[in-house]
Amino acid sequence: MAVRVDRLHHFAVAAVALLLLAYSSLAPAARADAVDDYIQAEMKKQNIPGLSLAVVKDGKVVKAQGYGLANVELRVPATADTVYEIGSVTKQFTAAAILMLVEQGKVGLDDTVGKYVEGTPDAWKAVTVRHLLTHTSGIKSYTGLPDFRKRTVLPTTKEELVRLMAGHPLEFAPGAKWAYNNTGYFLLGLVIEKAGGKPYADFLREHIFTPLGMTSTRVNDESAVIANRASGYSRDKGALRNADAISMTWPYAAGAIVSTVTDLAKWDAALNTERLLKKGSRDAMWTRVKLNDGKESDYGFGWSVGQVRGRRNLSHGGGIPGFSAFLSRFPEDGWTVVVLTNQDSGANPGAIARGVAGRYVAALAPVAAAPIEDKEPQVTALVKSVYEQAARGKVDAARFTPELAQIGEAQLKQGLKEFLQNLGPLQSIALVERRDEGDNRLYRYRLAYKDAALLTLCTLNKEGKIAGLSVQPE
């Protein structure tokens, strides 16, 4: 499950709009102070030990700053140069590396994965590089395995992971659906190594990090001494603790990069130019994927492709034990916000990035979704109970499709329970969107808590089972 949040209505919306207009008219220094106040308030609310922020306008850094502690035990302050694990923000770099190889004629987007990866089963013979990039392969994601967290304590080999996932049947025909998939990006790392002729880490260093001067960015090595490396934290029953260990052989090309907000600002600036990729490649990277039935999903190649209040938004989040990250670009406005934190459960960098963006550009600030008439209160009651149970660490498997029930249990263990508990009791739920999509029914609700709100999208299949459930911070 992913995690979004919305706002109030009528007078509240007007008040927010007036406040944000006031923000936009402030002098830069005053506006920066307002951002500092907002960041510090959110860190306190979300119990985040350390956070680093970069705000970029048209490729130039407007603000880069650290808040709180990079290491709590040693009382080391977080700075703009603190190095964090960025989790799935890694996927942007993996996708860019693939597109570089496409431009060089070494990879075809419609080549099958078996052309580059040994040991693939017959079931994957129709899976292409494009399917891997867009999360439409149908291959099972290894992060959905019931014992995934236990497995990741010990290292794996690339061959072992391919063999492990090859033993699972496809969850759907390639291109038929969209389902977030870390196995796909792991396999893309192998494509890069085969076609690029060198290890994944070396390819990224030579073709992206070094040319851009991203001197603090690398594929993580747990045993390496990395200057300014932050310590990662989790929470257990409200208490801060050192995050669980994980071997970087598992996240690999799906999530093993470490970086800083200043380095990611350099990456963002390069995306406005042809230093790394031609315009056609960048356009393809930021184009929504089209499924077999002609419908589209809000994902391109390593990027979520969506809108914020009618403006294009290109983003990606990352979560890995001890860390959470978010990079959000608003190309029409020329603004980018990067938020890196050293806490996993309960930290919501996507919500913080959106809040920061709204303080620089009033038009990007969240606005409440208006409630609509609710003609199916039984569905509303179902969704409400799901979130109330999730806050207690429970999943009623009978309410979900088998695949989603399994994923839901894994997500609870990765921090959703802690996140919901930090919000306190659910105070209200309101339907804001209802539509049919084939045999499925889609419901979007606003979940209100004391100090925050979430937007959740629930998909029911024709049997009335929950086939999709996403929740995102505002």
Image (cartoon, rainbow, N blue to C red):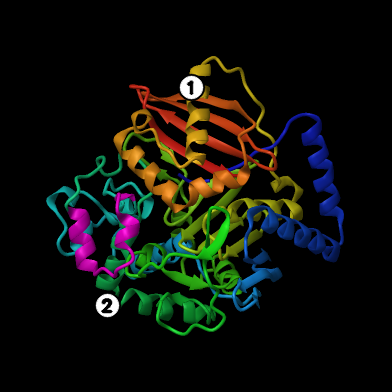
Residue 452 % position (x, y) = 67, 42
Q: Which residues are magenta?
A: 144-166
Q: Which residue shows up at 31% across the image and 39% down it? A: 403
Task: Name the disc covering residue 379, or none.
Answer: 1
> Which element carries disc 1, helix, strand or loop?
helix
Q: Looking at the picture, which amino acid does disc 2 mark?
A: Gly
**If you read the primary sequence from the N terminus, does the residue marked by circle 1 or circle 2 appear first?**
2
Q: Looking at the picture, which amino acid does disc 1 mark?
A: Val
Query: What distance separates the C-alpha of mark 1 from that of mark 2?
Result: 53 Å
Residue 302 % position (x, y) = 43, 57
Q: Which residue shows up at 27% across the image and 67% down it? A: 190
Q: Within the image, what quadrant is residue 14 found in?
A: top right
Q: From the viewer's perspective, is residue 454 above or below residue 158?
A: above
Mostly what secondary structure, the magenta segment?
helix
Task: Name the disc covering residue 197, or none.
Answer: 2
Q: Which residue shows up at 52% across the image and 68% down it? A: 232
Q: From the viewer's perspective, is residue 460 above or below residue 406?
A: above
